[in-house]
Amino acid sequence: MHKHSLVCHSVASWVTILWICGAAAFAAAPQDDGKLTPDQLDFFETKIRPVLIEHCYRCHATSEQSVRGGLSVENREALLAGGESGPAIVPGDLDNSSLWHAINYRDNRMPPKGKLAPNIIADFKTWIEMGAPDPRVNQGVVVHAKVTPEDIQAGKSFWAFTPPQRVEPKLEQFQNWGETSIDRLVAAKWEVQGIEPTDDCDANTLVRRLTMDLVGLPPTPEQREGFLEDWQSSPQGAIARLADELLESRQYAERWARHWLDAARYAESSGKESDMSFPNAWRYRDYVIQSFENDKPYDRFLLEQIAGDLLPVGDDSQWNENLIATGFLAIGPKSLTEQNPRQFQADLVDEQIDTTTRVVLGLSVGCARCHDHKFDPIPQSDYYALAGIFQSTETFYGGTRTIRNRQPSDSIRLPVQDPEASKPVMTLQDIEDLKKELQERQQELAEARRAQRTGGTTPGLNANILDQIVGQLRAKINSVDATGRPVSVCMGVQDRQSIRNARVLVRGEIDQPAQEIPRGFVQVLGNLPDKLPASGSGRLEFAKWLVAKENPLTARVMVNRIWQQLIGQGIVREPDNFGLSGPMPTHRELLDYLALEMMDQNWSVKSIIRSIVTSRVYRLKTDQDPSRFEADPENLWIARGNVKRLSAEAIRDAMLSVSGSIELKPPRASILAAMGSALMGPNGPQNAPLLIAPGGSGNDDRSENLRRLLGGNLRNPAVNLLELPNYHRSVYLPITRNNLPRALDAFDFADPNMVTGTREVSNTAEQALYMLNNPFVLELSDAFARRLIQSSTDPQARVDRAFQIAYGRPASREEIQASVKFVRKAKDSQSQVPSDEAMFKAWSQFCQAILGSAEFRIVR
């Protein structure tokens, strides 16, 4: 089972202290002591806000599902309101501030997983005693428990709901620092904060930073040497040339598509109680990769994913692409064991609304399913206005009805078939045999079920196994046309023939429908149509509304995601929460500049990436000078670079690359595509490969015939099909929701059950053990060793080569000496094996140490 990070989940006493009544009004009001002084603002931003974000927001922020006890700690009013144990904060009064007692572990404990460090507790003491200054109250919006039209109108003045504007900063101290608008906008904050930036990083550091950020692979020796040569004549020219080279590569698209797939909650199975495979999900993955490779305009990218089936096309190839793009709405998790179709449909629509609004708008509109939004000016009627659009849309994800899949659907047949489909894969006799086998199995299944109902027995007939086999036979028959040629299908959506508005569900319950709500959009964002056409779902109009330049959020949210991946932190620190409960942007003028720039550049993602990586801000060193660190410990003002740990995929891909084992040619489809719809278990599909006829031994004629018809082979069920050797890039690994590949799961891969804007970063014993014992790591260490041995006969040259390949820098004299000594001792410790073998094993151990080192998995 995929592990989730569970933070602040325990202690009832903590829930009691951090509780706010749902009926309480919340949002910004004028602070009692007026405008904050620069010192107060600086203290809160550097000492208090980062602690709240790290230790409290996950359980006490944004949506009712994650707000433990109902309290948000994201604004001053919430902290002042407190709960059953009294106010969380009473400015100037420690004794009556329940939060103070909680962090000191008196009566209650916050956070429950471990007491805060003494210096942090001291900071909170100082903060409360100075009056608890908190800038998160100057939003000018009051939202009540029941959102009113006045709340919506007032909400339009909130920064995120107003149009982005260009601001030209006036610089004095840093007027000659940097050459780009990005540099000037960041430097303007340094002048206000009184902060000095670090120096630029060196060329070796920068070339590795560029390649890891843009393509997720370490620089090749040729790339590094070419960059260093260009650097001598023009550092800026060297950066621009390498950036252009990387952005035009397939590897860039694979790297940046994965960032989008995190947000799009991409997976190849349904998850939940019955984790059924989605054998055609890979088409959406490949569509995303191709879109990034082609630098498809972001507005077009969104239009295709939300309403591609409704867009005009010039040919069938474009129609293919558009249909596949709508897989965005179809690939989410699904509770396929749900027996009530109305409940299943309501949950499906809810997941589509929540995903779309979080990914595109950075808003949690899904929180208004049961009541008006508790934090943002989004009434419940807005949720059901969108629900009418998605209820008028049919979702296609495939599958056949079995006891583990009570909510199957069709797939969408593509107008252009795959090249592989030109030749029949089944004869007409094969099809007839399948149909005959299906009829026999259906009769046996009916007999077994009758026996179950009457309490009788049917020796050799297991209803559950028969149910799975019948489902597989149906899927096999449906996978070809009448001539035996494969049928190309995809996941996606299309408008229903019957268009209908949604009814409000009281408390979200399907058996409590109330008034009907006309289909529409989120009111607070404005630019609303008078009325949606009655002839369609309104999905196309919704998509066009999302990407209209008048929409204040779409471009801002996307450029914030891009900035976060390159700089290491978002301008808005919570990329999926641009609402009132989210953090304010640290550089609003910069965010607006990037949003406007992307729209002006035809919504080009590559143009924004290029602008950022060619700025001087991107080149800043990560060194932490003590005085500079003390002035800005969280690096809010970006006066230095951020050290970033590689993502799970980048760690695996980097090991493949440096060992010389990587296969850069994209694979065809996915391993799950060939297995069809199947129940996923810890070792892959549970039913597809185990084709033994009911009552048979596995070697009998009926079992053999079944395997022949379904294309299966007997295998050891302990063999994990999801962990078979695979040398392609990690973006192509099979992603099933309940069982992730270990190489990804160990290093904080995104949870495919939800929108993931920011991955957690951990440092665990499990990771160390993986690098120490995993057979794949050992295999790649051997391959890396062979590469070094073939490069030179000189041990010192081999060590230096290893450092240049793995770390992107030459080894120091001390490192060379220590490494050669390590290899010699490792060889001498294996006196029982032949000398050549002992030497190879020694170099392999050295390579494993390189791959397992901290320097290998971080970017400075």
Image (cartoon, rainbow, N blue to C red):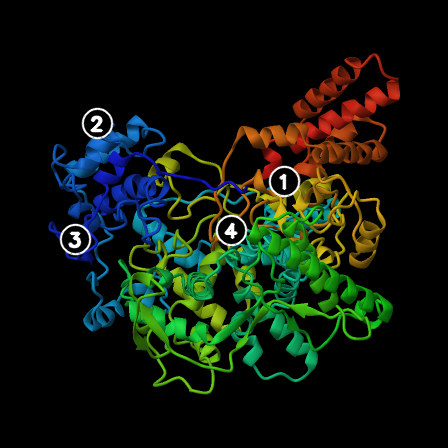
Kind of residue sitting beneath label 2: Arg
Percent x, y of residue 728: 73, 49
User: Gap in Å between the C-alphas at discs 2 and 1?
Assistant: 42 Å
Instruction: Give the label on residue 35, or none.
Output: 3
- Rendered image: mark on residue 272: 4
Amino acid type at mark 1: Ala
Q: Which residue is mark 2?
A: 106
Can residue 603 be seen in this snapshot? no
Disc nearer the start of the sequence (2/4): 2
Quarter of the image for residue 857 reads top right
Say above or below: 281 vs 212. below
> What residue is shown at x 41% (from left), y 80% (from top)?
500
Mark closer to the observer (2, 4): 4
Query: Dot 3: few (<14), some (14–19), or many (≥20) neighbours within 10 Å?
Result: some
**Residue 18, quarter of the rendered image:** top left
| Quadrant of the rendered image containing residue 8 | top left
Q: Secondary structure at mark 4?
A: loop
- Judged left or right of residue 172, residue 561 is right
Of the two numbered discs 4 and 3 on the same chain, state the one appearing first in sequence: 3
Amino acid type, mark 3 = Lys
Which residue is located at x 56 percent, y 61 percent? Answer: 331
Give how far across and how far down residue 359 sits, in percent.
46, 61
